[in-house]
Image (tube, grey):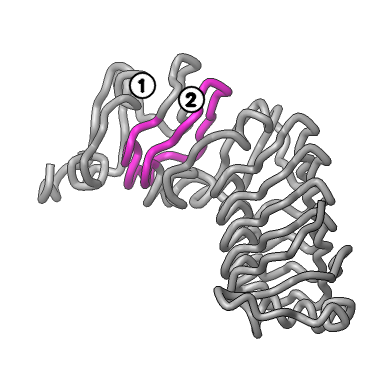
Amino acid sequence: FEGCSGLTEVHITDLTAWCAIEFESFSANPLYYAHHLFMDGEEVTKLQIPSDVASIGNCAFYGCSGLQSVEIPDSVTSIGSSAFEGCSGLTEVHITDLTAWCGIKFYNNNANPLSSAHHLFMDGEEVTKLQIPSGVTSIGSYAFEGCSGLKEVAIGSGVTSIGRNAFEGCSGLQSVEIPDSVTSIGMNAFEGCSGLQSVTIGSGVASIGEYAFYGCSGLQSVTFRDPNGWSVGNGRTPIDPKDLQTPATAANFLTNSYLGNTWTKETTD
């Protein structure tokens, strides 16, 4: 459909079938030009993904600016590249189960509708205070990317890893406490969390990815529960534990001095 600039409407009959289409590029999808999706003669503004859908294909709703909200069922386990890119009209993402949501594989940042909508809802209420359930062991990459409506996050004691870009763009967050159960924080995990003022790094964390706190301009205090054994970069340049015992210095290291380095900690059995 490349170059079909006069398109204004795309009509389909089955959302399950539509989600299964693998578009090879954004211009393969007529929605890129039309911006408005219709089913049974009515424009789809409140998109409800059917419960028999396990995977939403690449570029599935690319450019569909007519969408205002989307409901993702627990059955969905993967969302393809750029599936919701350009959905500028989205303001709400509705889910029913945080455990299922944390386990979705998003193939890139624009796969997650939150990158456009910015507001997450569960049981009809906006989630501003996020409680990661105890049954969750891993927060997937891009899981809450762009969710600026989040104000607080409580990470359950069962979580062992935080994926890359997991909380990117959550500009409403003010503080985060990472429990001792977490062993790794992915690259760019908290990128763009400009409202973040304080972070606690649990004693179990042994790896912090590059640019994990990039753009966290308000971060003033970082508390390492275990400041010993840390080094940065491929050369494993050691960091003096005394520096990490000072919250302001630790914050500067994470957001400035060693921002583009992988942090690793020696662990003892």
Q: Which residues are magenta?
A: 56-83
Compared across the picture, whether 235 is left or right of 36 comes to: right
Task: Locate residue 164 relative to residue 124 in the image: left or right.
Answer: left
Q: Position of residue 168 (x, y in %)?
A: 59, 59
Label annotation for residue 15: 1
Say if the magenta span includes residue 111: no
Q: Which mark is residue 47?
A: none
Mark 1 is surrounded, within 10 Å at the Cα level, by few (under 14), some (14 to 19) or many (20 or more) other residues, namely: some
Is there a contact, CB below 8 Å, between mark 2 and mark 1? yes
- Residue 177 in sight from this viewpoint: no
Please tell me whether mark 1 sits on a helix, a strand or a loop.
helix
Query: Which residue is most to the front?
Result: 269
Q: Nearer the viewer, residue 145 or 136?
A: 136
Where does the image place residue 7, in percent across and percent down from the top left? 17, 42
Q: Find the distance from the CA under tag 2 to the CA under tag 1.
A: 9 Å
Q: Residue at x 63, y 75 (%)?
A: 236
Q: Please tell me whether residue 83 is drawn above or below residue 37 in the rendered image.
A: below
Residue 145, percent from left and from top = 57, 52
The answer to whether residue 38 is above or below residue 137 is above
Give residue 163's position: percent from left, percent from top: 60, 50
- What amino acid is found at the position of numbered circle 1 in the picture? Leu
> What residue is shown at x 64% (from left), y 62% (from top)?
190
Mark closer to the chain start, 2 or 1: 1
Q: Secondary structure at mark 2?
A: strand
Residue at coordinates 63% horizontally, 55% vertically from top-left? Answer: 167
The structure residue drawn at horizontal position 46% and vertical position 24%, both measured from the top left corner, is: 49
- Hey, what amino acid is under mark 2? Gln
Report if residue 11 is visible in the image: yes
Quarter of the view holding residue 223: bottom right
Residue hosting label 2? 48
